Image (cartoon, rainbow, N blue to C red):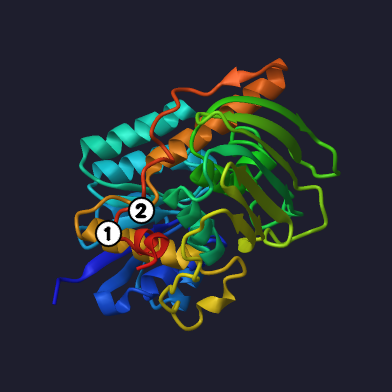
Amino acid sequence: MSAAYGYGIIGCGWVASAHAWGVRGLANDRVRLVGVADQDEARAGQLAERFGVSRTATDYRELLADDAIHAVSICLPDHLHHEVVIAAAESGKHILCEKPLSLTVDQADDMLAACERNGVQLGFVMNHRYAPGNILARRVVETGALGRPLIASVLHSSGLSGDPRGPSPWRGRRRLSAGGVLSTQAIHFLDLLLWLGGPVSSVQAWTDLLGSADQDHEDTVGVALRMASGALTTLTATSASPIMDDFTGTRIELHGTGGYLILDGDELRVADLAEGPDLTPPQLPPAPAGSEEIVFGSGHVYELMDFVRTVRAGGTAPIPGTDGRHLLAVIDAAYRSASDRKAVDVDEPTAAYLVAAPEHSLLGSAIAGV
């Protein structure tokens, strides 16, 4: 049996438990949660107690100095990602970073360079990609059954705002977050749009505060995107809605020369294709008992398990930091467009979002239907 593999979690807010459940799902692989860190000692202690972890720290550098830890999750507010990811890379740890990757594209480039320089993988959390309906949609795209992409749309509403009384008071705050609804909630569904439709070449956007949320950034956004493929797409989103469930408040459509598909809250509701692939739902492994408490599903659990298994075997992150960098470039272009009231080209559209998940990863196998 292979040697034990140690994991650490930096940041013990409300999303951290989803990462901890992912580590627990790897118990049979001899992966264990070695330590957790948070500047709030009580919060770190609560997570440690729940998951049977003996080590806590108020300084994340203590975890990074521990040779028993091979990889870490970064579950911190947006403005801390840059500093901590670079420190983790320089400590030789593989990294799974929550979204958005950073505050700016320049910061994202620094992070990617540090990881490449130190020979570590940078994974990017996009948990919705592991939903069976979204996996089936990607399978349709990869087989070419949708044909040439023509148009697509995302409609998203949510009541999760930058309320300073909530669990994440930094959300929607200038210098603490990358933006408002676009970079906080709608980013997940923009990611799915790009995962299914490829990278973006230019953006025209409008942002506003139309609700009563007390925040510095937008609570409502409308974005028109020209994809590198030539397809024309739109995204509209608001966090001023009373809906508190990302799943019921989201709809994605893609139309191509070979047919169309509709995703309704991560479920493939409609797929009308002239010639289609096998749409048998992928069989994902059971999530660890108890993880059903995660209100936003098992995507984090599956992504963390997939990330650890692939990087431990010497492979690449199933959802790479390069996708996170391009996604941030699209969001940055949208904010500049809204400010300047004109279309903005996206910084260097590349192969991001065109690269298939590693063949032997959980995500890659599920897309292939094996």
Examine the image and state in which quarter residue 320 appears. Answer: top left
Quadrant in which the C terminus appears: bottom left
Mark 1 lies on residue: 310
Helix or strand or loop: what does disc 1 sit on? Answer: helix
Mark with earlier residue (1, 2): 1
From the viewer's perspective, tell me whether residue 204 is left or right of residue 49.
right
Quick check: marks 1 and 2 in contact, CB under 8 Å? yes
The Cα–Cα distance between marks 1 and 2, rounded to whole angstroms, is: 7 Å
Q: Which amino acid type corresponds to the residue marked 2 in the rendered image?
A: Pro
Q: For mark 1, does the 10 Å Cα neighbourhood hold few (<14), some (14 to 19), or many (20 or more) residues?
A: some
Q: Residue at x 56, y 63 (%)?
A: 133
Q: Is residue 127 visible?
A: no
Residue 76 is situated, as x and y percent measured from the top left of the image, at 49, 50
Q: For mark 2, does the 10 Å Cα neighbourhood hold few (<14), some (14 to 19), or many (20 or more) residues?
A: many
Residue 95 is situated, as x and y percent measured from the top left of the image, at 34, 50
Q: Nearer the viewer, residue 87 or 153?
A: 153
Quadrant in which the N terminus appears: bottom left
Q: Examine the rendered structure and indicate whether residue 336 appears above or below residue 33.
A: above
Q: Nearer the viewer, residue 314 or 293?
A: 314
Residue 248 is situated, as x and y percent measured from the top left of the image, at 73, 62
Q: Residue at x 69, y 16 (%)?
A: 342
Q: Residue furthest front?
A: 274
Q: Which amino acid type corresponds to the residue marked 1 in the rendered image?
A: Thr
Residue 347 is situated, as x and y percent measured from the top left of the image, at 48, 22
Q: Residue at x 38, y 75 (%)?
A: 25
Q: Nearer the viewer, residue 198 or 348?
A: 198
Q: Is residue 138 visible?
A: yes
From the viewer's perspective, tell me whether residue 40 is left or right of residue 30.
right
Mark 2 lies on residue: 318
Q: Residue at x 15, y 71 (%)?
A: 3
